[in-house]
Amino acid sequence: MQQLSLLTVLDSYKSGSQSNPEAYAQLGESCDIPVEAWEQRRSIGRAGKAHSPLKRKVRWYQQTLRRLGLLEPVAGRRGHWRATDEGRRTIEQREKDLEPAAPGVVQLGFSTELGMALWADCRDAFSRIEEFVHCVLTSPPYPLAHQRDYGGPAREEYVDWLCACLEPLVRRLAPGASVFLSISNDIFEDGSPARSLYRERLVIALHERLGLSKMDEWIWHNPSKAPGPIAWASKRRVQVNTSWEPIYWFTNDPQACFTDNRRVLRPHTASHTRFVSRGGAASAGVFGDGANQRRVGSFAALTAGAIPRNVLTVPHNCPSQAALRKWAKDEGIPLHSATMPLELAEHIVRFAMEPGMLLADPFGGWLTSAVAAERNGCRWIVTERMRAFLYAAQWRMLSAVDAA
């Protein structure tokens, strides 16, 4: 979990005025603060009343930023704040510190024995790749109404943009290779509690334009996901809080697909182990109008482990990310506001690849996919447009290699 600071609070207002609940939700997401942490209370002050220390800290930072001339309350709207002109200039300067790659230029950020990180736009770099790619694992920028520091396409251009980014990689996929996309379900029509259909349009476009077949839609259940959508769940009350995101899995050849669930088997539970040791099912049964039948002794075979489900519960709070956030903060390096847990990336890498195969990620960020590949003996090639993210990722990669 990243510690709150004046600048992280100021950054939460870059998209315009926000209410305090909206600011809490955005800070929870960008700083990896668990939902339950905001509701923890303790006695504060002479009266001994219970308050949330986190929320009090945010309000204290708001007042400090106000005295600095960087934040101001919105007239007539209690609990709403916005950045001043000077505050917006401060936010814009911090975004410039990310240093985007020059168009058409591909430079080596750093490399290991297994892979290389390129400072470049993915369309410039992967149009030149000559080797077969065995897995694409990436989390592209979401089609947000107000994009994060690292930018992204306009909502109406999102499907075309992402297809164009993936096309060079799809041309170099080995037969049976996989493409895993972690994207958002929480994109809404403007001013409406109805969810956007961009996901459905994207799936159809990837099939019709790039020839990819949809293998599955995994559910990433994130129990530490910040509450939201604030406007529709907390204010209008017509939605419920969300706790999952989809991970789409595609392949260019379903019959040749070389994923293998034996590489990601889970340990059997103690109760299942006892069930097998007793000889499996003790009685016969017929269920579902005969669609399913159970014989005496069914499920008695001892197996290497349980096949995982396509619902993966992985908290967003990741020790690997937390260590990097602390280091980046100490070094004064801009923080990445949207990262995938390393545990989730490693599960996908082991399922989709064997050691020595090549992984590609066109939106590297802090190189979670590359670290997962490196830790599992896979080669990797990653692009990232923002130099600051690559600088932080290099420290993370070297730390991961030294720990291996």
Image: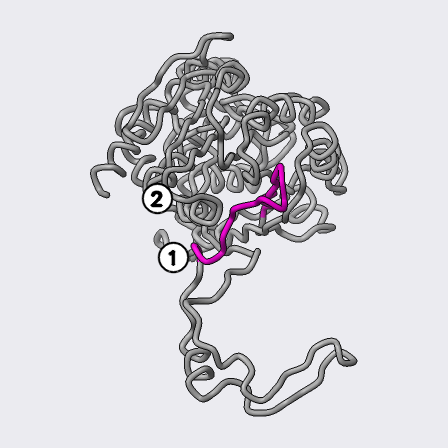
Relative to 360, 217 lies left or right: right
Q: Looking at the picture, which amino acid does disc 1 mark?
A: Arg
Vertical comparison of 150 with 278: above or below: above
- Residue under pointer 2: 376
Can residue 181 be seen at all in this image of the molecule?
no
Q: Is residue 253 magenta?
A: yes
Residue at horizontal 51 percent and vertical 51 percent from the top: 222
Quadrant of residue 323 within the rendered picture: top left
Location of the N terminus (image quadrant): top left
Vertical comparison of 277 with 184: above or below: below
Report the Cα–Cα distance between label 1 and label 2: 44 Å
- Residue under pointer 1: 42
Check disc 2 and report its element: helix, strand or loop: loop
Check disc 1 and report its element: helix, strand or loop: strand
Residue lying at the far bottom in this picture: please name it. 283
Q: Position of residue 14 (x, y in %)?
A: 53, 24
Q: Looking at the picture, which amino acid does disc 2 mark?
A: Asn
Q: Which residues are magenta?
A: 245-264
Residue at horizontal 64 percent and vertical 42 percent from the top: 185
Is the residue marked by circle 1 packed among few (<14), some (14-19), or many (20+) residues within 10 Å? few
